[in-house]
Amino acid sequence: MKFVFLSLLFIIAASTQAKDALVKVTFGRTSAPAMTELKAGSRFSTSSKSRSEIALENGLMRTGSNTSVLMQSEDNIVLEKGLTLVATKPRFFRRSIQVQTPAHQLKIKGTAQIYHNPGQSIRVVVIEGIMTISLNSMSREKVTLRAGQVLLINLAETELPEPLEIDLGRLISSAELLADQFEPLPSNDLIQDASSRQARDYDILDSSDGDESGDEEDEWDDGDASEDDFDDSSDIDARNEELLHSAAADAIDDLDGDGDPDDGLFNP
């Protein structure tokens, strides 16, 4: 019995031991070829017009052109510069992957894209799931983003901005790191669900804004409505105020990494 117990402990310990990251596929010039193991403390980089996919313990990471990452540990990555997409494995108890920059900590439990321009800006988008980003400063200020939300951070600022909303459908169709060149992500079904849900939500908002049929009067007539029943209209107004306008979108170079300006990515 004691032998069986010790054997089980050995199996559990072996299964939970951290594995090295593995370069699965590369396109263009990269610092290591496919099937290279990336041990803790090693760096990986891509050149111009190059991409890669790296298998992690709890998901995967894709890197865009001119990107450099440091593998702190198997699921803890320092994004030194450039563009990366991180996707955690979909499962009941979904584990997170951590991405660091000099001033920020990002915990991703889902699929997210992160661009780091050192000394200038960080741009993050949650494609599905959630991500928490916090400052490394004493304030430890934190923002949680959900699917369809984007954070545009000016590194000269000492506080985190408010999240804005991006058109997931356009991003998915144009993002270089979601292109058919790669195999479908394990989270692909969740990405499609998030995009469809966002499209339905905005269809509802559009129909609500254009509805002049007098339904509000009918609601008062049924005798059950109260002032609280009309709070949704203020929520709609507040949400519309949070949407990124085209003037702000013009200041973004290439959030989706396809080499072209991001015109049209943001919800009007």
Image (spheres, rainbow, N blue to C red):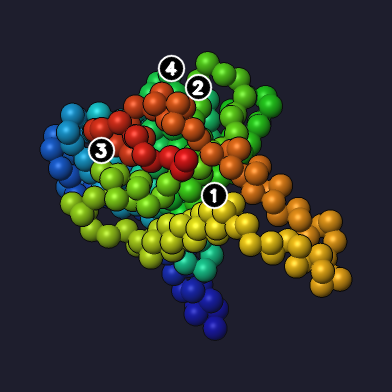
Helix, strand or loop at label 4? It is: loop
Helix, strand or loop at label 2? It is: strand
Mark 4 neighbour density, 10 Å: few (under 14) some (14–19) many (20 or more): few
Q: Is residue 222 above or below residue 138?
A: below
Amino acid type of the residue that numbered disc 2 sits on in the rendered structure: Asn
* Residue 119 disc label: 4
Between marks 4 and 3, how big is the CA–CA gap?
22 Å
Q: Which residue is mark 2?
A: 154
The residue at the point 17 percent across, 33 percent down is 49
The residue at the point 44 percent across, 31 percent down is 246
The image shows residue 112 at horizontal and vertical percentages of 43, 46
The residue at the point 28 percent across, 45 percent down is 174
Earlier sequence position, callout 4 versus callout 3: 4
Q: Nearer the viewer, residue 34 or 91?
A: 91
Helix, strand or loop at label 1? It is: strand
Earlier sequence position, callout 2 versus callout 4: 4
Mark 2 neighbour density, 10 Å: few (under 14) some (14–19) many (20 or more): some
Q: Nearer the viewer, residue 1 or 217?
A: 217
Amino acid type of the residue that numbered disc 4 sits on in the rendered structure: Gly
Please identify the residue farthest to the front as the structure is shown.
213
Between marks 1 and 4, how big is the CA–CA gap?
26 Å
Q: Which residue is mark 3?
A: 258
Q: Quadrant of residue 114?
A: top left
Query: CB atoms at circles 2 and 4 under 8 Å apart?
Result: no
Amino acid type of the residue that numbered disc 1 sits on in the rendered structure: Arg
The residue at the point 67 percent across, 24 percent down is 138
